[in-house]
Image: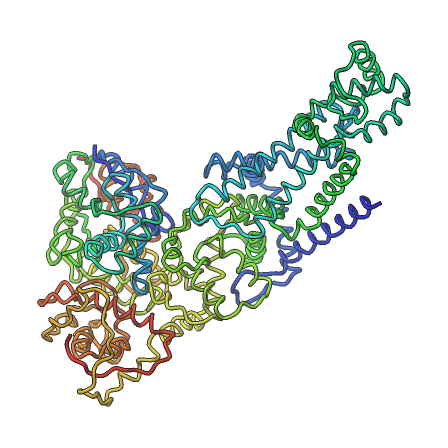
Amino acid sequence: MVFTVSLYASLIIFVLGLIYKVYTWLHRQVGFSQERPRLLKRCLSALTGMALTVFSLKLFKLLQAFFLDVLLQRKILKESFLRWVMHMLIFWGFMLLLLMHALGQLITASLFSNYESTLNPYFFLRDLFGLMVLVGVVIAVVRRSLLKVPRLKTNAMDRYAIIILAVIILSGIFLTGLKITSKTEFSNMVDAYAGLWGEEARALESYWVSEQGLVSPELEPPFKENILKQGKRLHQTYCAYCHADAQSSFTSYSFAKALHPVAAALDRAGFVEIFWYIHFLSCFLGLAYLPFSKMLHIFSTPISLLANAVMDEEKSKPENIATRQVIELDACTHCCTCSLYCSAMMGYEAKLNPYILPSEKMAPLKALAAGKKLDETETKAVLEGVYLCTNCDRCTVVCPSGINLRQLWINAREKLLQQGPAEPLMLSQLSFVRGLNRQRVSDDLYGLPLEKADKAVRRRFEPLLEADRSIDLDQAGSGRVPSLISETTFSYCFGCQNCSTVCPVVANYENPQEALGLLPHQIMCSLGLGLTETAMASKMIWYCLTCYQCQEHCPQNVKVTDILYELKYMAVESMDEKTENEDQAGGLI
Amino acid sequence: MMRYSLFIGCQIPSRVPQYETAARAVLGKLGVDLVDNKQFNCCGYPMRNVDKKSYLLSSARNLALAEDAGHDMLVFCNCCYGALKNAEHIMKEEGRLQDEIREKLREMGLTYAGNVRIRHYLSVLYNEIGVAALKEQLQNTYKDLNIAVQYGCHLLRPSPVTQFDDPVKPTIFDELVAATGAKSVEWANKLECCGAPLMGINDGLSMDLSRQKIKAAVKAGAHFFCTSCPYCQIQFDTVQNMIVSKNPESEHLASVIFPQLLGLSMGIDPQTLGIGLNKRDITMIESYLTKE
């Protein structure tokens, strides 16, 4: 009763969950796009896309990807042999258990007419497959806890996946082990299949105690030779035709042996039943929760791998790419291969913002695609995370799930830039790739995030640039000093203006001062006067090419470009400061 | 056998893959052995503008990894080269930031003592292999081909840090180009920036600077730009395409990457050199080749 009800309940939740997931795949969207394609359109495009692929030469590519990437998982093998062994053991062990054991009556029985779960090879294979999964799970635990894999993060979902697998397999092994030792189970079977009593029943029981791992409260070895002989004969008559030797179920048998001292007590306490409940309930829990857990990847990752094999970034329909990206969010197994090789990894080490790591960005992107609102600090961190990316594509190349992470970042980035807070990283060369892809964004939106960032780093200091501002010459300066000794070389400046003369940015403007605020020599002069914040207000520091012409041509060895760098750092640091400007002439240090 | 740790950077694998295949083919033929290191990360250049710690840590980790591997570093990108050289320079000084970086490296099981040499491949071609030896490897030379050499800023300046060539009158790149029989023309703003550092920050300014360079090179009679940095190459290739598509009348000049130019004259097949992969067509360059 409990079994049937929980089976159907979990099946219903599983199916509804899958339907819901497919709906989200066709409904949600990652990031930014001017128009949102309709659900129906996405459905139709996905179906026609799939049909066109199946009925074209791409079918071979698809089949190749299915065998090499899905069944043999070569992308994992390429990355690490240990991980490949781990995943192959879990994947094949679990799949075969599912097909042969869980769906035994449906599948195995219809394929093999003599199927009986307690007969070999099935009896042996069940244990073998279970052991495969178990070994895989142990490797997974060791990898995530003992091996110090850099930037490998383990979250609640990873723990859940490992725990549910371990509980299902261990409860299965324990259950079989307990059954092997159980006198109650033995008596029930004898009543059902042999109907023996008296001396014959005792002979059979003695044989099972001696040879099959049974623990009997009444009978204990040593047994007489002739009784065992009789028991064996009875065993062969009544049991052997549908029950292989308990030893074939080798892990459970070993467990049964270990249980020996306490087996009788466990049997009386009804542990067989308890573990039977644990086993099937954990299986059904796993099934019902599958669409909402990391285990969904057994569906979504093959889809991602297959789509990756046949979809063309340039030629595919935008609505299909949108659909694929949502599936990809679910296809991520949080294996953290991307974060192992991420080029921006030291950005993470310096800033300790986990969202800089590709593997950690997936969760907030998922939340955003689901329409959840992130709070202000969270949004800021996620935005910094998606922007501190050098667009080297390494994550996309190494991802064992075949996720096109590059495209995912580009899409997610634009939406956050448009809607999120000012991001100073926009004023760095990380923006190069956004510039190259500017046709993806309409012209009127493209410049907005840049303006926002520019404002944020200069807002406080801008009034200092007013031409008629009076400067108190007696007051001390703001006290801001660049961090490296070489960056105080501005004090050598004697105002020859070479730096501004050779600067290609200055040369590009008819009225450079209007466009740039202060020119390089004026910035050096301001610093000499202690007007550090005034220098920080200048657009010049942000429009510096860092071509080092100024520094190279300075007759006084002023490190002009390096000083501009320092001013940029100070401006970024002061972004969130609420204090008033303190800039007063303070004189050369 | 010359052996180096190859530092490929971020731009080349993702946006200029032909640079890598061409450079590997050319260097391989010249007996330079390149050791790959999957552990290398970004040089830090793109973060340098706003975040010094991220920059310095990125560079320093690469230097520490290369030092640990025991080979000098070979760099294909001027901006990586400049960033790494500058980090080497900064790490020589004492300071709080340097201590912090060293501590972070130590946590990662790395140390950096400053014992690894950072080399740009042009410098290796010029100083280790030499123009004469290079010429011996050539199967064809160019005739009547005018090249506008683009040195790139972060290779030349600041010269006390990069130590590549004379920052005001450099000759290394010109001599290497001349070795192939091509003529390196003198052009007005040869040593100026390509504009790439501002692409994405101030696109108008960035494209203005590129346009001025194109104009000057065309005026000097150049048939092609020749670059040794992926940023310059993307600027003269992808960004030039953007400039031209916006204003079809504007002057234009396709750009060849130096290993492509050299590779063709060494007889390496155009496919390996990725001649067809440049955004602006450079296939015409083969018509300037003459058999030795």
For residue A453, side relative to residue A298 (left or right): left
The reply to whether residue B278 is visible in this rendering is: no
The image shows a total of numbered marks equal to: 0
From this view, report whether residue A259 is shown above or below residue A447: above
Q: In which quarter of the image is the C terminus of chain B?
A: top left
For residue B64, side relative to residue A29 (left or right): left
Q: Which of A465 and B280 is in front in this view?
A: A465
Residue A58 is situated, as x and y percent measured from the top left of the image, at: 56, 41
Residue A515 is situated, as x and y percent measured from the top left of the image, at: 27, 78
**Can you name the residue that lies furthest to the top here?**
A226
Is the image coloured rainbow, by chain, by secondary structure, or in one colour? rainbow
Q: Quadrant of the N terminus of chain B?
A: top left
Q: Which residue is drawn at 15% across and 52% down?
A: B163
Q: Residue at x 49, y 71 (%)?
A: A376
From this view, report whether residue B231 is shown above or below residue A515: above
Residue B103 is situated, as x and y percent measured from the top left of the image, at: 31, 53
The reply to whether residue A397 is visible in this rendering is: yes
Quadrant in the rendering for residue A577 = bottom left
Q: Which of A534 and A162 is in front in this view?
A: A162
Quadrant in the rendering for residue A117 = top right
For residue A369, side relative to residue A548 (left or right): right
From this view, report whether residue B25 is shown above or below residue A294: above
Residue A359 is situated, as x and y percent measured from the top left of the image, at: 49, 52
Q: Which of A37 and A20 is in front in this view?
A: A20
From this view, report whether residue B290 is shown above or below residue A8: above
Quadrant in the rendering for residue A113 = top right
Q: Nearer the viewer, residue B250 or A331?
A: A331
